[in-house]
Structure formats: structure tokens, C-alpha cells
Image (cartoon, rainbow, N blue to C red):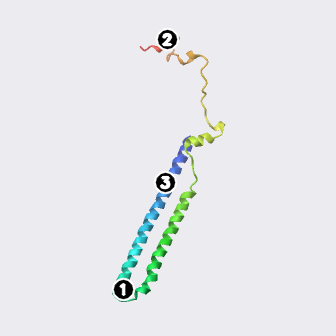
Amino acid sequence: MHNLKQKRIHYIFRKLTANTLTVTAIVLGALAFAAVLLGTILCAIFITEQSLISPMLLLPLMIAVPALVILKVMEVCNAQAQKARAIAYVPPVREQVARLPSEDVLVRASDQPVDHQELLRGATAQPAAEADELLHSV
């Protein structure tokens, strides 16, 4: 039973870690894309103001650089999401126990005792007392 619980805890920890890394990759990718896009726009503005290059020549650069960044971000995020999906599912312990073969499960008998007086006995080695006497507090 302890091993089943450890397997479930390990599964939850791995799944949580993988999903956290996926979300982190998405957030960092979005920030990287925004930074590259802003940087590209600022560079284009600076170059245009300095009249170094025609603005029309910068247009492919302004499209290509952020597009390459977003493609790489999508690749990294997809790879991390696949790692998260590849983690084998471990069901809760009660579902695992239900699937075990009967010889691996310890089952306590639920039959009623043959003699109802069997449940009422003294805790010391004194002679047997009456059932009513055992039920009364001292």
C-alpha cells in the first residue's frame, strides 16, 4: 500500500513539474517575442530616422525576425507539452488497490463473531466476570 501511495505522489510531482515547465516556457516565449518585436520596431524607427536605409527594405526584417522567434518558441513549448503528455498515468490508490489480484490484498473478515460474549472479556488474568459487570464503569 505504501508503494502504491509513493507511486501516486511521484506521478503527481512529475506531472506538476512538467506542466509548470510548459507554462513557464509559454510565458518566457511570449516575453521573448514581445522583446524581439519591440526591439525590431525600435531599430526600424532609429534606422528610418537616420535615413540609413529605406523603410521598405526593413519590412522583411521586421517580419522575419519575430516570426523566427515565435517559431522557435512554439517548438520549445510543443516539446515540453509532449514531455508532459508522455508521463504515464498513475491512478489514485483506491483504484490501484481495486485492480490488484485477490492474493495481494489483505482483507479483514466481516463475519459476525460466533459468540457475542467473545467481545466482552477482562483485560487482566482475573477470573471471568459477568458481561454486565464488564460494561459498568468503576
Element marked by disc 3: helix
Q: Is residue 38 left or right of residue 5?
A: left
Quadrant holding the N terminus: top right
Name the residue nearer the viewer: 123 or 74: 74
**Circles 3 and 2 in contact, beta carbons < 8 Å:** no
**Residue ranking furthest to the left:** 49
Residue topped by disc 2: 132
Residue topped by disc 3: 16
Could you tell which of marks 1 and 3 lies nearer the N-terminus?
3
How many numbered marks have been drawn onto this rendered protein structure? 3
Could you tell which of marks 3 and 2 lies nearer the N-terminus?
3
Task: State the residue at coordinates (34%, 83%).
Answer: 46
Q: Which mark is residue 116?
A: none
Q: Could you tell me residue 92's position as x and y percent?
A: 55, 44
Quarter of the view holding residue 112: top right
Q: Could you tell me residue 71's position as x and y percent?
A: 50, 72
Quarter of the view holding residue 40: bottom left
How far apart are the two marked residues, 1 and 2, measured between alpha carbons?
103 Å
Could you tell which of marks 1 and 2 lies nearer the N-terminus?
1
> What amino acid is found at the position of numbered circle 3 in the picture?
Leu
Disc 1 vs disc 2: which is toward the camera? 1
Name the residue nearer the viewer: 2 or 67: 67
How far apart are the two marked residues, 1 and 3, measured between alpha carbons?
48 Å
Q: Residues within 10 Å of mark 2 (few under 14, many from 20)?
A: few
> What amino acid is found at the position of numbered circle 2 in the picture?
Asp
> What amino acid is found at the position of numbered circle 1 in the picture?
Thr
Element marked by disc 2: helix
